Amino acid sequence: MYYDDLPIWGFLGKVDKEGKNDPSEYKYYLFKHLHFTIFYNKDRVIEITAQSDLSNVVDLTEDKEVDVEFMYSVKWKETEIPFEKRMEKYSQSSSLPHHLEIHWFSIINSCVTVLLLTGFLATILMRVLKNDFVKYAHDEESAEDQEETGWKYIHGDVFRYPKYKSLLAAAFGSGTQLFTLTIFIFMLALVGVFYPYNRGALFTALVVIYALTAGIAGYTAASFFCQLEGTNWVRNLLLTGALFCGPLFLTFCFLNTVAIAYSATAALPFGTIVVIFLIWALVTTPLLVLGGIAGKNSKAEFQAPVRTTKYPREIPQLPWYRKTVPQMAMAGFLPFSAIYIELYYIFASVWGHRIYTIYSILFIVFIILLIVTAFITVALTYFQLAAEDHEWWWRSFLCGGSTGLFIYGYCLYYYYARSDMSGFMQTSFFFGYMACVCYGFFLMLGTIGFRASLFFVRHIYRSIKCE
């Protein structure tokens, strides 16, 4: 329960197991009387506790309807604690030394992994690329007619625009918007807007900032789509607007209907839904369109350092582990391992009763996640090009985003091994909303991976002379 925004925990009843081995013999009792103790300072409530009266119970062992008269009593006590400090009791519980130690241990662990990985990849790529550059420069001087091999060999195809470029541009726009949203949320969190039990602050901030950053999605998607020589930019904008909001809206409608059917307090009231719809119609959509028009008129060129040939070259037969799905599994595992421990705490606070207050640590973990995602995608893109497979556009996006699928896999593990959730409503809420969050992560990290790969590919082809 909440009282003046302070949370109270307590038991509804008890199970009597004494001397009974068989679960069917257990006795179930419901408490009829709750006693609240409220501490106040002048006219402000400082602390509240609830106790159940163990003598005042109703036997519920037989599964039939019972009329119960509930009672409560309250005792008011004066205290000297000032109102400003009333939340400290809750903040301390999440930053207890042993929790903090686990956090820092996980961070140092992640950091070491990341440094090793990035160092490893950087050295390999630098050395390999250096050798490649030397070799290609040498080849040009020595023999004009010999066959080119490796990534230089496909220079005429590497910037051939991908299939479904409208969808790629839309995903790129949505991902950029979600990335901006995350950065803004972190700024607010680090400033201290989301103190514990400021209920709904995070939700409100997400809705408002998502609405205000819609222009970024429109601009990024439209300008990238026009760089890829796309023609129907209006359809592309509609796709950008619906790519994340569409699935989210459908999931929300279904889950809200479930909550109403169960007459649960988790159902959003009609007024709130109308307000969110108005924000979407009057803020998000116009900003998306304005951003799209600005992006279309930015007339940016797609800076391809080499010319694309007329006909695509055939991709050689590749072993199974160079196909998209195994590469995605490789790409998603490392970033996921860097955030794995932090995920446990976040899940425990979102779906459990823990309180999460250590945003600074979360921000460090987020930065680590971005770095690992970018590096691993760049490395896989390099190996893909070296194998003369030039379809890297979608691959880099999917490899970057695959961490989102890993997080969803973790949801399954958490649901069965860590949580005590049961029943249709809890299950559908958990998997429905987590699917939306993981999809958001997929778009955001996919964008990061794709950005990094695009930068890398441009960079290496700029450094060599191609006929």
Image: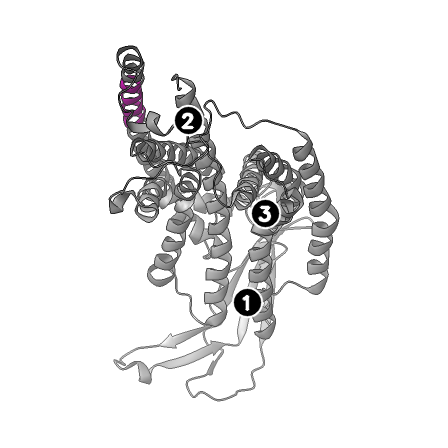
Of the two numbered discs 3 and 1 on the same chain, state the one appearing first in sequence: 1
Query: Element at badge 1?
Result: strand
Q: Report which quarter residue 464 is drawn in.
A: top left
| Spot occupied by residue 277 in the image (x, y as percentages of width and height) | 70, 56
Looking at this view, is 463 or 173 the one in front? 463
Query: Element at badge 2?
Result: helix
Instruction: Give the prevailing secondary structure in the magenta stretch.
Output: helix
Q: Residues within 10 Å of mark 3 (few under 14, many from 20)?
A: some
- Residue 202 is tagged as 3
Q: Which residues are magenta?
A: 119-132
Image quarter (top left, top right, bottom left or bottom right) of the N terminus: bottom right
Q: Is residue 418 left or right of residue 277?
A: left
Identified by mark 1, the residue type is His
| Spot occupied by residue 254 in the image (x, y as percentages of width and height) | 57, 66
**CA–CA distance between discs 3 and 1?**
32 Å
Q: Residue at x 45, y 23 (%)?
A: 306
**CA–CA distance between discs 2 and 3?**
36 Å
Identified by mark 2, the residue type is Phe
- Residue 35 is tagged as 1
Q: Would you place residue 127 above or below residue 450 in this image?
A: above
Of the two numbered discs 1 and 2 on the same chain, state the one appearing first in sequence: 1
Disc 2 target residue: 456
Q: Residue at x 56, y 83 (%)?
A: 68
Q: What scheme was used to colour the molecule?
A: one colour
**CA–CA distance between discs 1 and 2?**
65 Å
